[in-house]
Image: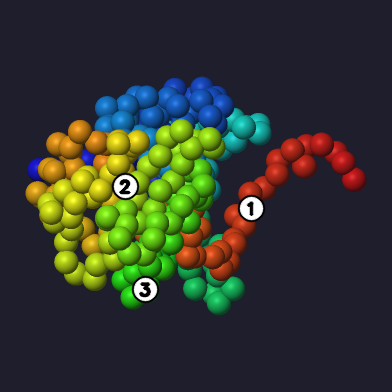
Amino acid sequence: METVDLPKFNETFGPILQVLSDGKILKGRELLGVVEERFYSNLPVELLQRTTKSGERLIENRIAWGKSYLKKGGLVHYPQRGQVQITDKGKEAAAQGVGLEQLHSNVISFYEPENTRRTGSSIAVGADSPQDLIDAGFEQIESEVKDELLSKLKEIDPYRFETIILILLKKMGYGDFIETAKSGDGGIDGIINEDQLGLEKIYIQAKRFTQNKVRETDIRNFIGAMSGDTRKGIFVTTSSFDQKAVKKAHDAHHTIVLLDGEGLVDLMHKFNVGVQIKNSYEVKAVDSDFFDSGEV
């Protein structure tokens, strides 16, 4: 079965030119909406809702980069700020039904010879937009950090692991927490207040496993240890849960959330627990208002 995915930025060239082929001037934002509606509205909702690392909708970002490359390749132009219109070169390409690869070659030809790196070599352009390359780099770094984070969690003292889980839940917006005694806690490692008055309590069980999966008996003991003043629990592990454990938690009268190692490090990364910001990068764009304002 063919995998459905969002179009690459160069795959939006044809659709953009088709939308503009009548020669009408469209606002940039309007163009993005028309192209998406006409050519990509049938894609799954979860794909259309995907975002870049900066939070911009990825489908709009890809179309916008396609428009930018078409402009640099001379197939469209901007008659006024915020507007876009097809050129004669673009009309010719659209009328001939130029294939994506050939069109891509035409568009990126503007890089040579005037737009080259300072070393004199031409800029390589593939199917990934600059934003795609940025996001891919961040994703690789993020993946490596999460792998290292999980390794650290599997090595630390089990009691310290329990404390880290409670700190994470506090960072996520839950109320104050209470660490239970390190012995005789009946399978409960901590209690957090879901509200500031402590009317709703959530019991926590944290298992720092290196390889072993959490089994049904672990979930059963956790349920048995929960007192009558709460029906909510979170079972956290650095490993994973076997199928019987998942079924036991699902079938329980209590509401039990299972959080495995992968989900745990995702949350720790998101809420900055056990990690720190090493570098920040700014991505700048031309401020058109500055050139139009006439300010000195």
Which residue sits at x=45%, y=38%?
Answer: 194
Rendering coords of residue 122 (x, y %):
48, 68
Residue with the most extreme right position: 296
In the image, residue 94 above or below residue 225: above
Lateral position of residue 200 relative to residue 295, left or right: left
Q: For the residue labelled by badge 3, is the local secondary structure a helix, a strand or a loop?
A: loop
The colouring scheme, among rainbow, by chain, secondary structure or one colour, is rainbow
The residue identified by callout 3 is 157
The residue identified by callout 1 is 284
Tag 2: amino acid: Ile
Discs 3, 2 touching: Cβ within 8 Å? no
Q: Earlier in the sequence, mark 1 or mark 3?
A: 3
Tag 1: amino acid: Lys
Which residue sits at x=18%, y=43%?
Answer: 249
The answer to which of 52 and 132 lies nearer the viewer is: 52
Tag in front: 1 or 2 = 2
The residue identified by callout 2 is 234
Marker disc for residue 88: none
CA neighbours of label 1 inside 10 A, class few (<14), some (14 to 19), many (20+): few
Lateral position of residue 192 relative to residue 29, left or right: left
CA neighbours of label 3 inside 10 A, class few (<14), some (14 to 19), many (20+): few
In the image, residue 254 above or below residue 30: below
Quadrant location, the N terminus = top left
Distance from the alpha carbon under mark 1 to that under mark 2: 43 Å
